[in-house]
Structures are given as C-alpha cells and as structure tokens.
Amino acid sequence: MKSIVYTQHGGSDVLTLVERPIPEPGPGEVRVRVHVSGVNPTDWKTRTAPVFGPLGEQGQVPNQDGAGVIDAVGEGVPADRIGERVWLWEAAWRRADGTAQQYLVIPQRQAVALPEHASFELGASLGVPALTAHRCLTVADGGPTRLTPGSLAGRTVLVAGGAGAVGNAAIQLARWAGATVITTVSGPYKAELAKAAGAHHVVNYRTRDAASAIREIAPAGVDIIVEVAPAANAELDHAVAAQNAVIAYYAGNPDDELRIPVRAAMTGNLRWQGVLLYFVSDEAKKNAVADVSAAVADGAFRVGERAGLPLHRFPLERTADAHDAVRDNAVGKVLIEVEHSA
C-alpha cells in the first residue's frame, strides 16, 4: 500500500511516499481503507518538531483525521462492521500510523459510523475541529456537558474567527444546539463563509468596533466565547463577556502571553479555559464523538463553500503541498484524496 512517512522532524520535504505492507487488525481493532485524509494545523506542527515526543524507528504517518470503509476486523470486533463507512479521529495520537495512507489499523472506537448521506469529505473534516469545538461549547459552569437540539437555547455564543475549521464547526454545532451565534471575521469573503455556516450575526472587526457591535447584538453579553487568538482578543473578550461567562481558547503561538485584567475577571466571575483535544478526558471525548455523530445524522454538519468551509483537495503524493497549504492559512478545509491518488 502507499503511505506517507517521515522519519525525522522538519519541513514538508521530510514527507516521503513509500510502499508498505497492508496491516492486519489486532484484537479490538479495525482496518480501514482510507478514502479521504483531513489535514489540521496540529499535523504540520507536530511534523516540524518533537512536540509530543521522539519518532519511533519506523517513522510517522501523519494526519489525525480521515474517513473510509472498514474492510477487516480483529478479534472481539463484530464482523458486521466490515463494509461500514466511518470517520476517524486521533489516528496518529501516540501511534505511528495516521490517515495519510491507503489502509489504516485503528482501535474500533476511533472508527465511527458515517451515515450514507454524509460524504467522506465531511467525515474527514470532523475529528480535531468538531471535537475541539464541542469541548469549547461544553465547559461552561452549569453545562451543558452534552450538545443536543435545544441544549444551548437562551445562550449567546461568540465564535472568534468564524471562517476557520474549528470556528465553522463551532458555529454549526452551536446553531444545532439552539444558541444565538455571533462571529467575528477579518473581511467580506470570510463574512460570507460565516453566514453560510449559520452564524446569526457576523462582525467584521476591521471595519467597525467589534466590542460595540457585539454589545448592540447582545446587551447582556455573551455566555460562551470560542477563542482562536486569546492573546490578541483578551480585551475584546472581557468587554463583551456576560456575568459567569467562559472563554474557551484552543489555539495560540508558543510565545504568546495572555494578560488578564484581574479585577474585571473577578467581578464578572469569568473563566478562561484552555482546550487541547489530546488531553481532554476520555469521558468528554466519548460525549463529543456521540454528539458530533448525532449532529451529522441530523444533517446539521455540512462542508463545502455553501456550508462556509471551502474544500482544497490534494492527491496522496502531494501531502507535502497539503501540509504547506494549512501552514499558510488556507481558508477552508484541506483534504487528501487517498482513494483517488495514483
């Protein structure tokens, strides 16, 4: 089978297309014929340096997310899972095999049923973005810890950077759960994408004062903030946060420093909550997978330009270009079409 492997950390030029034997699933595992692999910032960042530890002797196949069809099962896995369409999550977390290859063996719980109406492109776009968004939306004091239709009714959610992959997922999940959704963007094109994702209100922070605009929409403030740039947006977040709000941040540069106005945070009973999916509890991940799957089954998750998430497709042999596209902040979702690669 064809696989992308890197045996040393570095730029995208360390990614190599190789031939490897098709693996066999062990107990509790399934083998998936991968159709589409999704690329996230975490994939190229962990490739550049030993963020989570050194590489093994066999190297690393990148990419956490993907979608495909189960074609073999190991001991203890029901045989009727063969032929099941699935989406994959955390494939490469503490494992040498990610989704940038034609076949992948993975614990069966990380291969989640994908409804017939959902495309493989959608399946490969879930994983890191959707599970991260779910966590950000479920860390507020008093819950909810689960997302269902109506579970965020009466809440106002602010999504910073609504045209990004996590931002798009947060908008769609919050909208499905019944929240009023506000998002900030940096330009007209991204504004259109955020509207397509389902945001009720879109604020271009380059053309108007974002704090004033958000307070006009939500005079009492916003209850949950899904934050992509905490260091840059801390002042804005405090200006628009409601009493007892949570600011859940999931991104930032290594050298960023977060400055919090102590008195304002105390008076507002505000909570800053860091979110890194890999270290979220097993119970929270289990809930997120179940709720994201329910949203997909309901048709609440979509991808493509009309859903506010343009797709950028690359063949397997151009995985390096796909990684570079994410590094260079491509607007939308970068996918590798494994099944259709030469």
Image: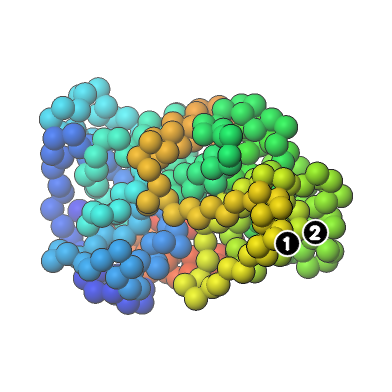
User: Residue 338 or 340: which is nearer the viewer?
Assistant: 338
User: Residue 263 or 315: which is nearer the viewer?
Assistant: 263
Image position of 223 (left or right of 63): right
Pointer 2 or 1: first along the chain: 2
Give the residue at mark 2. 211
Give the residue at mark 1. 236
Q: Does the rendering let one see residue 302?
A: no
Image position of 82 (left or right of 223): left
Image position of 32 (left or right of 197): left
- At x 71%, y 58%, the residue is 264
- At x 72%, y 41%, the residue is 156
Q: Does the rendering let one see residue 150?
A: yes
Whole-percent x, y for residue 201 in the image: 78, 47
Circle 2 crowding by C-alpha within 10 Å: few under 14, some 14–19, many from 20: some
Q: CA distance from mark 2 to mark 1?
A: 6 Å
Tell me the amino acid under the disc marked 1. Answer: Leu
Element type at mark 1: helix
Vertical comparison of 80 with 264: above or below:
above
Circle 1 crowding by C-alpha within 10 Å: few under 14, some 14–19, many from 20: some
User: Residue 223 or 309: which is nearer the viewer?
Assistant: 223
What colour scheme governs how the chains and residues are painted in the rendered image of this protein? rainbow
Q: Quadrant of residue 173?
A: top right
- At x 71%, y 65%, the residue is 235
Whole-percent x, y for residue 111 in the image: 32, 37
Tell me the amino acid under the disc marked 2. Answer: Ala
